[in-house]
Image (tube, rainbow, N blue to C red):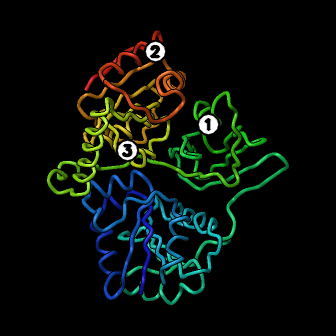
Amino acid sequence: MQIGIVIHNFQLMDSPKTVENILTLLSGDNCIDACLCGTMGKIAAIDAGMENLVEVGRLMKPSTCIEHFFRSKDLVCLLNHGKELTTGRTFGRIVVSHLKNPEEKPLIQIERPGRPDGELIPWNRVALPYAEKLSSLLNMKISRPPSPVNTIEVSKYGTRVLRRISTFPGANIMVEGIVVGKATSSEVALISENGFLTSMEGGIIKEQGIEILHKHEERVPVDLSIAWVKTATSRKNSDDFYDSMEGKNEWMAKTASSKKGFSQEKLLEGGVKVILIDHCAERSLDMMKGAGFVITIGDDTTEIAGNIFSRFGIPILGVTDGDCDELATEVRYSPGSLLLHLKQGKDDELGKEIKQHIFSGEQIACFENIDDLKPRIIKLAGDLLESISEY
């Protein structure tokens, strides 16, 4: 039997033995294909040395990955580890609500494996016989799926949209990858008027995040009823794997080798590929190929991207202003990295200047000399700059 396994939530990757055991048990006489959703989950998989077991090259949302497997697999499993069982079940319900045809193939959620409250959720009728087999195999109970599974909690009142999400106090609320607020309760409601996020019930809204979401002066509306909304917490215990990476990560070695080759080729042509990552750290792996230097805009973006690129020896120049949501608990930078600390609330302003004057409105550019590029950006910062950290 062909089984597709969609792995979500990097907490699972920080317990690699649990994931490895599940993949081993499911393989048996079956042919399994596992893919991982989310950039930080992919980094966790790389740290754990599991890139040979789990596909880390594809960049898809969970629902898209499930539909991809629907086309070729007999059974699809969604492997998740919510902070609490309630949030894990809510996550599964939202993912299923985005599927075009939830009944197309048997779909089972494996939620919080290895925990006493872990459960199997058969999301359609045809999945029940498979859930019974998995229950015996994984020693997990079967639960009924939350109802209803065909809608997300969205209410529309004319031009007003209200979207409710289940979370936990202290969680960051993200819309289209941008942190727009922090939850103060287990139930949060996002409210938009005419496509613009205006308020949040059960949480504290982040004005700077709202501005970034709507592209500042461009005032780009977002349809809250279908937008990508998620909660985010910091990744834990990355040091457990970081020290054991050297000499055992073939995928990293190959990637670093290809990067080196690309950079040398560009140097022969008279330049180095530099990429600009502006409040979208989750695109780091997608944009990394061939890069020799990276410029990041935003505190969390700089910490997350710096942590990612440090694994491949790529230095960054980070633009920060002290407005950090602590999405990353561990921060590492490659030698040669530079952090510009600006006056509060000014990183977006400099980010726009860098994109316009340094990158000519693009996100990728080629520069002859990185050492000449750094002072150009420092000069562009002008009076906004408060201090510089070198690594």
Q: What is the number of the mark on residue 205?
A: 1
Q: Which comes sooner in the sequence, label 1 or label 2? A: 1
CA gap between label 3 and label 2 equals 25 Å
Confirm whether residue 345 shows in the render: no
The x and y percentages for residue 352 are 54, 25
Q: What is the number of the mark on residue 288?
A: 3
Quadrant containing the N terminus is bottom left
Q: What is the number of the mark on residue 380?
A: 2
Q: Nearer the viewer, residue 319 or 57?
A: 57
Looking at the rendered image, the disc whose residue lies closer to the viewer, 3 or 1, is 3
Q: Which comes sooner in the sequence, label 3 or label 1? A: 1
CA gap between label 1 and label 2 equals 31 Å
Mark 3 residue crowding within 10 angstroms, few (<14) / some (14–19) / many (20+)? many
Circle 3 sits in a helix, a strand or a loop, which is it? loop
Circle 1 sits in a helix, a strand or a loop, which is it? strand
Q: Do callouts 3 and 2 mark residues in contact (Cβ within 8 Å)?
A: no
Three-letter code for the amino acid on which mark 2 is drawn: Leu
Identify which residue is drawn at 19% across, 52% down. 245
Three-letter code for the amino acid on which mark 1 is drawn: Ile
Q: Which comes sooner in the sequence, label 3 or label 2? A: 3
Identify which residue is drawn at 69% across, 52% down. 163
Q: Nearer the viewer, residue 275 or 222?
A: 275
Identify which residue is drawn at 50% across, 66% down. 65
Circle 2 sits in a helix, a strand or a loop, which is it? helix
**Quick check: 18 above or below 132?**
above
Q: Residue furthest front?
A: 269
